[in-house]
Each structure stands twice: as structure tokens, then as C-alpha cells.
Image (cartoon, coloured by chain):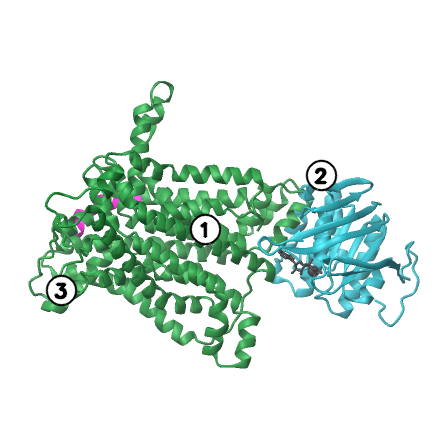
Chain colours: A cyan, B green
């Protein structure tokens, strides 16, 4: 249950022609909640996630996790110490490692050992329909399976926050529903604070409690609560509109 | 890739400065600025300064000519290479012209020329060069090769793979949606010239510039073909024992090169940014234009490798002596060279690995510029600086450090010279490889709490061993064919094969010269293709080792 605060964050990118990608973004995500982030391409969504993860340094403002500043004008906790899971738009799978190898690699630096590690791996493989594919490499997986692997890998270590950058973009209808279900369940079980970037209102509704629009580096209006079918407290309200898994 | 952090930036700057120390040291030898620029030899019509600038002009013409030849072959070859994922073996094949030592190429071409003049079996013309009395502007009456265009042609035919390898990744990027969209709107030729080529113009400029620099600082070919270029003037000062004068004489060329090198690294930096935006390379399967590409590639390989080497075969067969006699004289020098080139190649590979592991997500522009500079300055200039350094160290190594000087194996300075001269290749290949990686692969490891070192070892290195192998084999063949460093830094009593060959060539083109040329050419080709085969085989084996490694303590 980690509480995320983004306070007046600004970021400029580019080495020769500098672009103000984010200007004065302020957002709050309560512990265990999921914030949906929508916006046109180039509006700065990916950059915001990268700032939260600590992959970029910010120019202005502050990011706090559980009240503790992780990014600010004078502080920068390295990405590896923030315990954040990230599913990249490009996935960033490791071509030389098998499915098993992917999970092992991220678990190396985690506190899980022995049986616990094995159990965690088995759970994830099962939840994301990767059972039986343990020895395949990304090159030998379908497009959908690669997405599943990227999500499973992000969830494997002991994280307190999950950042998803258009994670379902390559999945077809049925598989997407399965993944959203699995992801929603794990999120709720572990009470993972989440930021989900997506263009699809169905995906956003299925997972987020709140929705916010980003335009040209600004937050537009106030975050609007979403009447999520899952409910903000994890209730199992019935799904609307024929998307049931 | 990111810009290096301040701390890493300082480390890079220190390393780069260390690389340049030998260049600075070479000014400390005998002779002076005035000696080179302010005096006129008694009895000479023009001042030394004038002679020097004429030589510089010749060097520049040679650079331009070689550049044109290299572009003519390199562009089509790169287009063909970009068609689909190529095996390392195929890449090695394309690098053959680069692997052929320039002096070997000269042997081959001269034999063909003399065969054309006299017919097989006729008396061989006396191609003995009086090195010291070499007339300005080349010799006449000895065939068209003994001229500025001749030197440019021989160099360009050997250097075109550089253009091909520079352009190849850019073409792979361009081959995706951009080229395919253009293909839908017009002919393949139009799509190539209006879309693919402009998209690769940065790399095109970089390749052309690199060929220009290497050709302009060539010593071997212009010396064998009797064209007085600036590197020859530099060499002459050196052989008179005036290392300082030599350094001053090389200065105009070094300044030219320094400017160009800085320019080149700007081009690379800009492209690195561009590729980050579009998310890196993709594979495409478009096949148009491949027939032309294949024909020109074949011609380039023929002219750059097969034909000159065949000339050496003809040269050996053409002489009445037995094959074994022709080869025997060169075996010992070849052994010396092989040992030291292999040592240099292995060190170069380790350096590439170290660069990948230490800074997997950072550019190393300072290192690349310094590496480029030591690659393209006249080799004699670099070598004389190293020699100063070596003798200085040996002299001052007393007391507790004496053992260092004594423990240095013979030839170590030469191997070190090779590594330094060609260090640009592992640095550049490492960076090129890192650029092709999706940054997210490293960042995921970072998020999982893996240290920078572990990111390099676990994620970057396993994806880039092909680049390491390529660095190893390129440094091997270049060191084997290198003349200036070998000539200056050879350990006492040992004669590297390139030096031996060069000396023999200046005495005349005998069967021993052709035999030795053939040996050197064959050794380089075998090393190159062998590494290529090894790499291809290793990939096929699809080692599952990395998984076990990733499991770590699990
Ligand atoms: N490395 C970079 N250098 C310069 N501009 C960049 C860089 N990365 C992203 N940008 C620019 O920043 C803006 C926001 O990018 P991004 O956060 O990826 O947007 P989104 O994910 O919303 O599509 C875009 O206009 C993009 O062109
Ligand atoms: Mg994005």
C-alpha cells in the first residue's frame, strides 16, 4: 500500500532542440489504487512513468512515495532501489534469455529465496498462461505471449508500485480479458499502487479507479473517479457490455 | 543511450587523454618547427614548407579518389547486406578486401600489370624503387598504377567495406515502413534514392570521411607506388632520426584529421538520438534492387580481394622456382606477426567487452574521438611517440619498478601499438552494438535492482558477442597487415611479416615477394573467415548457458 505523490513536476528532453515534455504535473494516487492515464501520442505519458520509476531525473517539482521524496531537485533514489515494476511500450524482453531466465534474472536481486521463489514463479507462469513455455525465448513466443511475459516479469520481484505503458496494445480481445483479469487479481491481492497508460477506455475502466487526461504535458482538469466494474474496494461487481472473460 | 554522468565523463576524458599521450610525446624527439617550416635545403628550388604542402595536397587527392571508389562499391554492398539478417560468416566475407594488406594488393596488381605488358612467362620488368630519390608526383613510364589515381584506386578497393559496414545499420532502419511506403508510391530506384539514401546520409558522410582519412594518411601504398605523400615526408624525417620534425611535419594532416574526427563523432551522436526516437532497428524482407547489389558486391570482392590475390598466385607460378622455396623465406616473419596480431586482437576484444560491461547505457564519445584520432593519424607518428614512451619507461624504470621493464615480453610494445592504433574498432563496434539494443532491456534490469555491472554482464554482453567477435577479427587482420607500427616497434631481432614484405618489395618483385604476399593474404582471409564461421556455428548451437547464468543462486 504505497502512496504516490507527484508534485509540480516538469521535465525537458532532448540534447540540441529541447522540448518541454512535462510542465507542472501534479497528481496523487492513494495506496493500492490504480490511476488511469490517457492522452494523445506525445503528450508525455511515457515520460511521466519514467520519472516515477527513476529512469529519468526531473527538472522541477518532487515525487514522493509514502511521503518520502524519491525524486526532487536534490534527491534521486536510483531506479533499482524504488521497488517499481514497469511494463514498457517496447516490452524490452531479453532475446538471449528464456521465459524462466527472465523471471530468474529479476528475482536475483529480490529477497525471495528457495521455495518461495519457485512458488512465486509458478504462480506467475500460471496466471499469465506461460506454463509449458518456460524454456522458450522471446523469439519463439507469439506477440501476445511476449506481452504476457513482460507483465509477469514486472510483477515477479517484490515491488510496491506497478507502472504499465500501454501493456495490452498487442493483445486480441479474449486474451486481453484474461490478462486484465489476472492483473486485476494480483493487483488487489498485493494492493499494488498502479499507473496505467492506455488509449482504450475499456482497459482503463477494467483496472483503474480514477482517470486523468494529459495534454501537451499538462494535466487537464481534475482526475475523475471511474465507476470501475471491480469497484474501488475490490468488490466483484458484474462486468458490463459483453466483455466478460 | 545516455550522455555519460560527470564522474564517468571524467574517467572517459582521462582515458582519452592517455591514448593521446604518445601523439604528444612524438613532438619531443629531435628536430623542431623551424627545421620543417622555416628552412630551405641548400641547392633545392623550393622550401621544405612548399614540399610539405604539395605532399599534403597529394594526400588529400588520394583521400578523395579512394573515397569515390569506396562509395561506388560500398553503397550497393550495404544495400544488399541490409536485406535480411546476415550471418557473421557473410559479414566476414564482405570484410575480405579490408583484410588484404595494402602491400599484398600492390604485389597482385603489379603482377597483373606486368603480365599484361609482357605476356605470361616474359621477362619481369625491374620494378626496383629508389626510395630516397623518389621524384615528386610519381614516376612515369612504369605504368598507370604509379600515380595518384593508382594509389587512390588500390586504397579505395581495399577500404570500401568500411562504407558498407557504416551504412548497413542505417539501411536496416530505413528498410522498414519508410522505404516500403515509398515503394508503394514509385519505382524501387526512386524509393532508394529519395528515401533510403537520404535517411542514411549521416552514416554515408561518416563512412566517406573515415575512408578519406585512412587513405589520406596512407603510407604503404603511396610508398610502394612512389607517390610522395605527407606520411612519406613524415617517415623520412623519422628515418633521419628527427622524430620532433616528423611530428611537426605531420601536424597539418593531424589538424585536418582532428577536425574531421570531431565532425564525425557529431554525426554519430546525432544519429544515436534519432534512433532512440524511432525505437531502434527492425528487420525487413524487401528484396528489390538486390540483383544490382549482388553484382556490384561480387565485383567489389573480386577487385578488392580475389583479383589481387590471384595476381600473387600468378606471380609465384610465373617464376621458375618451386612453391616451397617461394614460401619458405616468409614463414618465420609470419609467425612473429601472427603471434602479436592475435594477442592484439584478443586484447581488443576484451576492451570492447569491458566498455560494454562498464557503461552499457552510456555513450563514450570522448573515447571514440580519441580512438579515431590515433587510428587515422599517420601510423609512424603514433609509433614514434610510443617508442619514446617505451624507451623513456625503460630508462626510468629503476629501483622498485625495474622488474616491470624486465618482465615485459619482447614484442609487447608492438602488440600494444597495434591495440592502441586500432582501439577505435572495438570501441566503435561496442557502441554500435549497444545502440541497437532496446534501452528498455537494460532499464528493466535496472528496475529489478541489478547493478550497472550486472546489467552489462547479464543483458548487454550476451546480446553483443557477435560484435566482440567482429572486433577481434578486424583488429587481427588490420594488425597483420599494418606496416608503420610494425616497422617502428618491432622487437630487436624479429621482423614482422609486413615489414619483411615491404623491404623485399623495395628490392624488386621476385617470387619470394609474391609467395610472401600470398601467405599474408591467405592468413588474413583464413583468420577472418574462420572467426566468421565460428561465430555462425556458435549462434546455431544456440547456447542455453545464459539461462543457467540468469538463474544465479536459485
Ligand atoms: N529523448 C527525447 N528527446 C527529445 N524529445 C523527446 C525524447 N523522448 C520523448 N521526447 C518527446 O517528448 C514528448 C513526449 O513523449 P512521450 O512521453 O513518449 O509521449 P507519450 O508516451 O505520451 O506518447 C514527445 O513530443 C516526444 O517527441
Ligand atoms: Mg508513450
Disc 1 marks which residue? Answer: B428
Residue nearer the viewer, B546 or A122: B546
Q: Are marks 2 and 1 on the same chain?
A: no
Q: In the image, is residue B334 part of the stretch drawn in magenta?
A: yes
Does the closest atom of ligand 1 sit within 8 Å of the Cβ of label 3?
A: no
**Among the 4 quarters of the image, the one containing residue B340:** top left
* Magenta residues, start to end: B327-339
Select label 3 or label 1 by which is in front.
Answer: 1
- Residue B539 horizontal/vertical position (percent): 49, 56
Q: Residue at x 35, y 62 (%)?
A: B160
Label number found at residue A75: 2
Residue nearer the viewer, A154 or B224: B224
Q: Is residue B154 among what the camera can see?
A: yes
Label number found at residue B114: 3
Chain ID for label 3?
B
Give the crowd class for mark 2: few <14, some 14-19, many >=20 residues within 10 Å: few
Q: Secondary structure at mark 2?
A: loop
Q: Main secondary structure of the magenta part?
A: helix
Label pair 2/3, CB-CB below 8 angstroms? no
Q: Earlier in the sequence, mark 3 or mark 1?
A: 3
Q: Residue at x 85, y 68 (%)?
A: A244
Above or below, B292 relative to B51: below
Give the crowd class for mark 3: few <14, some 14-19, many >=20 residues within 10 Å: some
Q: Secondary structure at mark 1?
A: helix
Tell me the quadrant of ligand 2: bottom right
Q: Residue furthest top?
A: B399
Amino acid at each position: 500500500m504505497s502512496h504516490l505523490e507527484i508534485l509540480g513536476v516538469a521535465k525537458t528532453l532532448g540534447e540540441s532542440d529541447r522540448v518541454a515534455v512535462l510542465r507542472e504535473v501534479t497528481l496523487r494516487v492513494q495506496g493500492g489504487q490504480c490511476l488511469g492515464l490517457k492522452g494523445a501520442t506525445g503528450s508525455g505519458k511515457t515520460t511521466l512513468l519514467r520519472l516515477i520509476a527513476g529512469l529519468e531525473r526531473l527538472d522541477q517539482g518532487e515525487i514522493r512515495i509514502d511521503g518520502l521524496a524519491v525524486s526532487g531537485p536534490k534527491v534521486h533514489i536510483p531506479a533499482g532501489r524504488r521497488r517499481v515494476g514497469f511494463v514498457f511500450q517496447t516490452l524490452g524482453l531479453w532475446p538471449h534469455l528464456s521465459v524462466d531466465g527472465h523471471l530468474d534474472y529479476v528475482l536475483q536481486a529480490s529477497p525471495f529465496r528457495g521455495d518461495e521463489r519457485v512458488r512465486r514463479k509458478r504462480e506467475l507462469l500460471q496466471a499469465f498462461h506461460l506454463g509449458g513455455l518456460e524454456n522458450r525465448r522471446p523469439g519463439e513466443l507469439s506477440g501476445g505471449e511476449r506481452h504476457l511475459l513482460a507483465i509477469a516479469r514486472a510483477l515477479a520481484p517484490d515491488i510496491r508500485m506497478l507502472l504499465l505503458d500501454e501493456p495490452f496494445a498487442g493483445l486480441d480481445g479474449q486474451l486481453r480479458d484474461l490478462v486484465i483479469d489476472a492483473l486485476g487479481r494480483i493487483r488487489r491481492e498485493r494492493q499494488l499502487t498502479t499507473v496505467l497508460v492506455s488509449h482504450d477506455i475499456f482497459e482503463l475502466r477494467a483496472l483503474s479507479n480514477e482517470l486523468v487526461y494529459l495534454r501537451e504535458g499538462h494535466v487537464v482538469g481534475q482526475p475523475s473517479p471511474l465507476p470501475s466494474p471491480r469497484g474501488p474496494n475490490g468488490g466483484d461487481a458484474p462486468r458490463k457490455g459483453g466483455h466478460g472473460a | 543511450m545516455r550522455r555519460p554522468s560527470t564522474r564517468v565523463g571524467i574517467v572517459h576524458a582521462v582515458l582519452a587523454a592517455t591514448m593521446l599521450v604518445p601523439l604528444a610525446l612524438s613532438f619531443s624527439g629531435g628536430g623542431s618547427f623551424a627545421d620543417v617550416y622555416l628552412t630551405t635545403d641548400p641547392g633545392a628550388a623550393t622550401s621544405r614548407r612548399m614540399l610539405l604542402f604539395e605532399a599534403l595536397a597529394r594526400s588529400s587527392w588520394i583521400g578523395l579518389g579512394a573515397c569515390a571508389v569506396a562509395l561506388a562499391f560500398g553503397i550497393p554492398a550495404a544495400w544488399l547486406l541490409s536485406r535480411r539478417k546476415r550471418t557473421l560468416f557473410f559479414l566476414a566475407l564482405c570484410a575480405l578486401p579490408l583484410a588484404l594488406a595494402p602491400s599484398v594488393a600492390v604485389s597482385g596488381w603489379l603482377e597483373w600489370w606486368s603480365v599484361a605488358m609482357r605476356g605470361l612467362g616474359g621477362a619481369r620488368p625491374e620494378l626496383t624503387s629508389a626510395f630516397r630519390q623518389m621524384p615528386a608526383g610519381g614516376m612515369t613510364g612504369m605504368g598507370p598504377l604509379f600515380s595518384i589515381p593508382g594509389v587512390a584506386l588500390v586504397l579505395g578497393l581495399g577500404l570500401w567495406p568500411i562504407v558498407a559496414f557504416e551504412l548497413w545499420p542505417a539501411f536496416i532502419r530505413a528498410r522498414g515502413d519508410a522505404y516500403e511506403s515509398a515503394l508503394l508510391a514509385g519505382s524501387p530506384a526512386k524509393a532508394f534514392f529519395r528515401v533510403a539514401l537520404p535517411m542514411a546520409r549521416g552514416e554515408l558522410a561518416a563512412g566517406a570521411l573515415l575512408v578519406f582519412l585512412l587513405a589520406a594518411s596512407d603510407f604503404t601504398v603511396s610508398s610502394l607506388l612512389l607517390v610522395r605523400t605527407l606520411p612519406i615526408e613524415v617517415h623520412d624525417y623519422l628515418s633521419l632520426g628527427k622524430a620532433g620534425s616528423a611530428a611537426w611535419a605531420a601536424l597539418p594532416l593531424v589538424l585536418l584529421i582532428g577536425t574531421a574526427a570531431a565532425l564525425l563523432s557529431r554525426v554519430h551522436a546525432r544519429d544515436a538520438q534519432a534512433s532512440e526516437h524511432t525505437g531502434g532497428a527492425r528487420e525487413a524482407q524487401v528484396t528489390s534492387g538486390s540483383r544490382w547489389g549482388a553484382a556490384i558486391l561480387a565485383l567489389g570482392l573480386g577487385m578488392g580481394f580475389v583479383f589481387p590475390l590471384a595476381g600473387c598466385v600468378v606471380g609465384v607460378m610465373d617464376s621458375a622456382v618451386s612453391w616451397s622455396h617461394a614460401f619458405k623465406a616468409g614463414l618465420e616473419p609470419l609467425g612473429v606477426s601472427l603471434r602479436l596480431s592475435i594477442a592484439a586482437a584478443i586484447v581488443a576484444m576484451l576492451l570492447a567487452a569491458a566498455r560494454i560491461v562498464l557503461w552499457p547505457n552510456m555513450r563514450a564519445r570522448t573515447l571514440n574521438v580519441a580512438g579515431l584520432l590515433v587510428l587515422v593519424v599517420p601510423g609512424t607518428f603514433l609509433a614514434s611517440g610510443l617508442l619514446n614512451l617505451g624507451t623513456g619507461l625503460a630508462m626510468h624504470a629503476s629501483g622498485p619498478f625495474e622488474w616491470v621493464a624486465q618482465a615485459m615480453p619482447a614484442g609487447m610494445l608492438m602488440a600494444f601499438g597495434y591495440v592502441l592504433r586500432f582501439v577505435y574498432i572495438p570501441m566503435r563496434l561496442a557502441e554500435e552494438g549497444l545502440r541497437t539494443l532496446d534501452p528498455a532491456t537494460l532499464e528493466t534490469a535496472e528496475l529489478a535492482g541489478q547493478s550497472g555491472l550486472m546489467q552489462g554482464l547479464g543483458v548487454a554482453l550476451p546480446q553483443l558477442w557477435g560484435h566482440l567477435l567482429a572486433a577481434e577479427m578486424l583488429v587481427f587482420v588490420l594488425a597483420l597487415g599494418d606496416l608503420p607500427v610494425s616497422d617502428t616497434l618491432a622487437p630487436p631481432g624479429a621482423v614482422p611479416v609486413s615489414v619483411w614484405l615491404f623491404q623485399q618489395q623495395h628490392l624488386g618483385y621476385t617470387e619470394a615477394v609474391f609467395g610472401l604476399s600470398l601467405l599474408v593474404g591467405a592468413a588474413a582471409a583464413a583468420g577472418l573467415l574462420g572467426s566468421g564461421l565460428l561465430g555462425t556455428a556458435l549462434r546455431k548451437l544456440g547456447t542455453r548457458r545464459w539461462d543457467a547464468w540468469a538463474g544465479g543462486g536459485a
